[in-house]
């Protein structure tokens, strides 16, 4: 008997018992929906982190050690020149310093809403010393919206992230005033001259929005700090004393962070380079201690997380295959038990046991593929629904975009075929074991 005839017979029979077919397809589609949705989200997360960290393996930040807040870090005013005199400075592409203001200068707490964790949204005012150097390390200011421009030094101007404009355009827009809080009665006002492009906006806007980055020339942060640290300013110590910090420790022109981009592309070599630089800075400034935040280390940690994530996905896939197979087995067993006479007639007319097993497996595979196609459609709907839900509850929308790749699609089909084979094997063996004489005689 030709395989083609058996295959066509099995394909037609797959949907003959509608209730059994529907139950099998529903079970498989639910399993495939879970599998595709999980894989789409993890793939999107993986691509996002690779985009963010992949090009910045050789980038790291240096700040004062044991500082509880970024703005509490006080680096020497001449640290950039010192770093450029490092014996291995030929590996350095760019050095960029920043001066960050205390988080309490946020004058918009009431309108910024909360993060996905329910905590109030923050605001990070970043004073940039050299815009060209900053842009070579960070991507935030590479592209601005059409009516934007970069700020001018020695002017009270700022650039805001697109996410801040998008969520509060009636307050934050080109030409409007952005106020930095000095105390309960005084503010330092800036003109908004730029908005970052929609697809950009800083690492915080790309991964998980917990605060908005406001970009200003460093002369602005110098001027604000001069106001915050004046002894005659009302509540001037409010920004420091409650956190156990001494206001006299802070300098108006001291940077808080120095970011360094190197030509090194290997994470281990980056960490070795950081160790050498830390030792050098310790020699140059023996009264200070420094620490480094390396994106290479973050990338290594992310790789470990992704490896763990892949193991979890593998386990979930195995569970899905087993549960889906059990559902098909039960559905097919119900169908096989009701078709004993049919299988007895087939055997009596020349079908071999292998033909019957093969036909039942093909029926199961057909139902599996049909269930996978339904599951893929449902997964698209599930992903879109989750995107809308997260966009409505999280400031700035999704931290990453789910991605359904061809590999995910074909994996879903392969899982469905596997479920069909496993789910049809035992019922097929049961069906092939019928004895035509006993069944036809009604015993």
Image (cartoon, grey):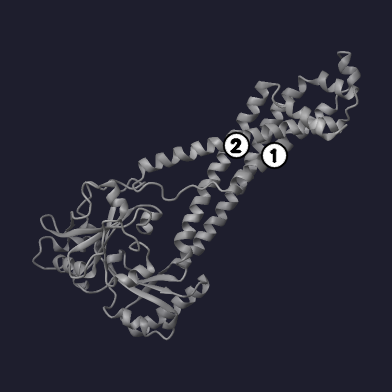
Report, in whole angstroms, how far the alpha carbon at label 1 lies from the one at label 2: 13 Å
> What residue is shown with label 2?
31
Tell me where residue 184 appears, x and y as whole percent: 13, 55
Q: Please identify, in this view, whether the residue under mark 1 or under mark 2 is nearer the observer.
A: 1
Tag 1: Cα neighbours inside 10 Å, few (<14), some, or many (≥20)?
Answer: many
Outermost residue, front side: 146
Tell me where residue 347 appears, x and y as whole percent: 88, 24
**Nearer-N-terminus badge (1/2):** 2
In this rendering, position of residue 432 left or right of residue 206: right
Q: Secondary structure at mark 1?
A: helix
Please indicate, yes or no, whether residue 429 appears anywhere in the rendered image. Answer: no
Tell me where residue 142 appears, x and y as whole percent: 35, 63
Q: Residue at x 91, y 26 (%)?
A: 350
- Report the disc number at residue 417: 1
Tell me where residue 11 appears, x and y as whole percent: 74, 29
Quarter of the image with the C terminus in it: top right
Residue 307 to residue 77: above or below:
above
Please indicate, yes or no, whether residue 340 appears anywhere in the rendered image. Answer: yes
In this rendering, position of residue 98 left or right of residue 399: left
Residue 414 to residue 49: above or below:
above
Residue 276 to residue 100: above or below:
below
Q: Quadrant of residue 322?
A: top right
In this rendering, position of residue 239 left or right of residue 91: left
Which sits in the foreground, 65 or 156? 156
Q: Residue at x 46, y 77 (%)?
A: 273
Residue 306 to residue 434: above or below:
below
């Amino acid at each position: 008997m030709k395989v083609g005839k058996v295959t066509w017979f099995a394909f037609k029979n797959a949907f003959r018992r509608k209730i059994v077919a529907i139950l099998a397809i529903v079970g498989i589609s639910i399993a495939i929906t879970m599998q595709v949705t999980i894989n789409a989200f993890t793939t999107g997360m993986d691509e996002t982190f690779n985009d963010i960290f992949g090009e910045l393996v050789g980038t790291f930040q240096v700040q004062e050690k044991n500082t509880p807040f970024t703005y509490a870090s006080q680096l020497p005013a001449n640290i950039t020149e010192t770093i450029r005199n490092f014996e291995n400075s030929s590996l350095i592409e760019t050095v960029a310093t920043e001066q960050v203001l205390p988080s309490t200068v946020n004058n918009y707490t009431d309108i910024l809403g909360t993060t996905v964790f329910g905590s109030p949204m923050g605001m990070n005012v970043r004073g940039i010393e050299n815009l060209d150097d900053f842009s070579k390390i960070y991507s935030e200011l590479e592209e601005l919206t059409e009516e934007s421009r970069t700020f001018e030094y020695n002017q009270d101007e700022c650039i805001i992230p697109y996410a801040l404009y998008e969520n509060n355009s009636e307050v934050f827009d080109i030409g409007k005033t952005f106020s930095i809080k000095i105390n309960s009665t005084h503010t330092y006002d800036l003109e908004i001259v730029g908005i970052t492009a929609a697809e950009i906006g800083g690492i915080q806007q790309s991964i998980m929005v917990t605060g908005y980055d406001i970009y200003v020339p460093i002369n602005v942060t110098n001027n604000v700090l001069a106001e915050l640290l004046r002894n005659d300013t009302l509540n001037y110590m409010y920004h420091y004393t409650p956190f156990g910090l001494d206001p006299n420790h802070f300098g108006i022109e001291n940077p808080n962070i120095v970011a360094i981009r190197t030509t090194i592309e290997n994470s281990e070599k980056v960490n070795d380079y950081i160790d050498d630089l830390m030792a050098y800075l310790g020699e140059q400034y023996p009264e200070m201690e420094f620490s480094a935040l390396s994106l290479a280390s973050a990338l290594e940690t992310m790789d470990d997380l992704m490896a763990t994530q892949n193991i979890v996905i593998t386990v979930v896939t195995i569970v899905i295959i087993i549960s889906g197979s059990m559902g098909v087995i039960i559905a097919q067993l119900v169908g096989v038990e009701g078709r004993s006479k049919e299988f007895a007639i087939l055997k009596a007319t020349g079908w071999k046991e292998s033909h019957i097993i093969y036909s039942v497996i093909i029926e199961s595979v057909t139902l599996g593929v049909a269930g996978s196609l339904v599951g893929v459609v449902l997964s698209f709907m599930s992903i879109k629904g989750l995107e809308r839900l997260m966009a409505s509850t999280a400031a700035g929308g999704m931290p990453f975009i789910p991605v359904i790749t061809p590999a995910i699609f074909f994996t879903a089909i392969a899982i469905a075929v596997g479920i069909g084979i496993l789910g049809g094997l035992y019922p097929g063996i049961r069906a092939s074991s019928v004895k035509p004489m006993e069944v036809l005689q009604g015993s």
